[in-house]
Image (cartoon, rainbow, N blue to C red):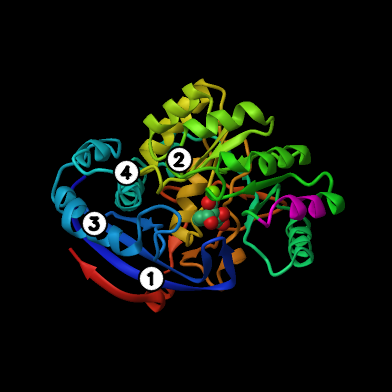
């Protein structure tokens, strides 16, 4: 394939309820949507998942647009690409910026799946017909409100819940949840809010039979995580620390984690995500697919990736209606009894809803 035209849209989607982390609240999701067309007219879609501010990792909506416009699109336009796996080599002169790279690589995977007449899941080597999903819950106004919300998610069938913790909002909150819901498949995500000086708190969390503790220590650390993992039995799950196959290899070698959360954008695309999946499988490290509050295109890519065999833990890919009044794809992503059916039709298996996309576009540029 040869990309002949790429449209980048700046989207703004209102959220049903705000998502609060230790860094602030998002009540509308702004992101970039990529529409790529090749010489035969096949259209592929990708989503740049970076937030407006760099509180999760260093990328932002504006840095992803800058990378796309000034570096990545010029490399790809009119260039012959035989297989999406070639894109990472083409981008190898550009350091990091995984979310920018991933957005356009995703569109190329979509075109490739359509042209080889298979679902994106099959194109990636995935065989599952359905995937198990959980839900991530932001910080709530009170522990009572949090417990009420967790119960409503469990009643909807979600297979596990993840709650956010930060210093001062940790052991007592989890103790209260456990008192009411002792068997709930529960995990916590700290988004790097702790250091080894907090060992006491982290060891107390070990008593609550948590599925895992996600990213307790620094975003760029794997050494201290290895020290911590030796002191607690709950598996550590790395999120922010893993930006590539090489990061994963080193973390596994050091014993820094028992689980890895793979986010397609954070690791630079589907090809790298699959390599990390395969590496983890060889090393018996279970993985799950994280989320970035994606709209429908990103959600569809997450579902396809999760169809690979070593995604053995429920991911954060909730149904479209969890966040959105109206998603940008038809049909929307539906969760039934904690499962999403993996589309078996050609391509991503969902159709971009251009009416909704146009309504939510605040600006666009064609390259
Ligand atoms: O997409 C989802 O539903 C999960 C969102 C989620 O938990 C996160 C998204 C982005 C940053 C964090 O707050 C958190 C995470 O770290 O996984
Ligand atoms: Mg996380």
Vertical arrangement, residue 6 with respect to residue 195, above or below: below
Q: Mark 3 or 4, which is nearer the eye?
A: 3
Rounded to the nearest whole Å, what is the CA distance between mark 3 and mark 2?
24 Å
- Indicate the position of residue 19 as horizontal and vertical percent values: 57, 66
Residue drawn 36% across and 57% down?
A: 48
User: Measuring 41% from the left and 57% from the top, which residue is drawn there?
Assistant: 49
Mark identifier at residue 241: 2
Disc number placed over residue 11 in the picture, else none: 1
- The count of marks equals 4
Identify the residue under disc 3: 68
Q: Depth check: 344 or 275 in front?
A: 275
Alpha carbon separation for disc pair 3 and 4: 20 Å
Q: Is residue 223 left or right of residue 48?
A: right
Q: How far apart are marks 2 and 4 (CA)?
A: 30 Å
Q: Nearer the viewer, mark 4 or mark 1?
A: 1
Within 10 Å of disc 2 (Cα), the crowding (few <14, some 14-19, many 20+) is many
Q: Do the residues labelled 2 and 4 touch (CB within 8 Å)?
A: no
According to the image, label 4 marks what residue? 112
* Residue 243 drawn in magenta: no
Residue bounds of the magenta highlight: 168-177
Q: Can residue 169 be found in the magenta stretch?
A: yes
Question: Which of the two labelled residues, at mark 3 and mark 4, occupies the earlier sequence position?
Answer: 3
Evaluate whether residue 119 shows in this view: no
State which quadrant residue 297 falls in: bottom left
Residue 54 spot, x, y in % from top left: 39, 59
Q: Earlier in the sequence, mark 1 or mark 3?
A: 1
């Amino acid at each position: 394939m040869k990309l002949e035209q790429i449209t980048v849209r700046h989207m703004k989607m209102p959220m049903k309820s705000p998502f609060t982390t230790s860094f602030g609240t998002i009540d509308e999701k702004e992101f970039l949507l990529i529409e790529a067309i090749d010489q035969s007219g096949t259209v592929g879609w990708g989503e740049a998942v970076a937030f407006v501010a760099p509180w999760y990792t260093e990328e932002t909506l504006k840095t992803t647009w800058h990378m796309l416009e000034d570096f990545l699109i010029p490399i790809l336009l009119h260039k012959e690409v035989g297989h999406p796996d070639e894109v990472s080599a083409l981008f190898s002169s550009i350091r990091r910026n995984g979310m920018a790279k991933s957005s356009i690589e995703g569109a190329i995977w979509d075109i490739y799946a359509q042209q080889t007449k298979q679902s994106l899941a099959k194109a990636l080597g995935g065989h599952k017909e359905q995937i198990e999903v959980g839900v991530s819950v932001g910080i709530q106004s009170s522990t009572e409100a949090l417990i009420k919300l967790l119960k409503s998610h469990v009643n909807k069938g979600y297979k596990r819940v993840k709650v956010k913790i930060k210093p001062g909002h940790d052991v007592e909150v989890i103790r209260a949840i456990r008192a009411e819901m002792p068997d709930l498949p529960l995990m916590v995500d700290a988004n790097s809010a702790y250091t080894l000086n907090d060992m006491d708190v982290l060891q107390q969390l070990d008593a609550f039979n948590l599925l895992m503790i996600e990213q307790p220590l620094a975003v760029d650390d794997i050494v201290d995580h290895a020290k911590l993992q030796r002191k607690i039995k709950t598996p550590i799950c790395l999120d922010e620390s893993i930006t590539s196959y090489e990061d994963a290899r080193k973390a596994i070698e050091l014993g820094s984690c028992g689980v890895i959360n793979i986010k397609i954008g954070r690791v630079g695309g589907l090809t790298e995500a699959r390599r990390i999946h395969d590496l983890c499988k060889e090393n018996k490290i279970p993985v799950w697919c994280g989320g970035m509050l994606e709209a429908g295109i990103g959600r569809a890519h997450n579902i396809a990736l999760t169809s690979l065999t070593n995604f053995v833990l429920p991911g954060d890919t909730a149904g479209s209606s969890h966040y959105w009044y109206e998603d940008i794809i038809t049909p929307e992503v539906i969760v039934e009894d904690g499962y999403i059916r993996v589309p078996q039709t050609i391509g991503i298996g969902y159709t971009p809803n251009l009416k909704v996309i146009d309504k939510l576009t605040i600006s666009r540029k064609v390259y």
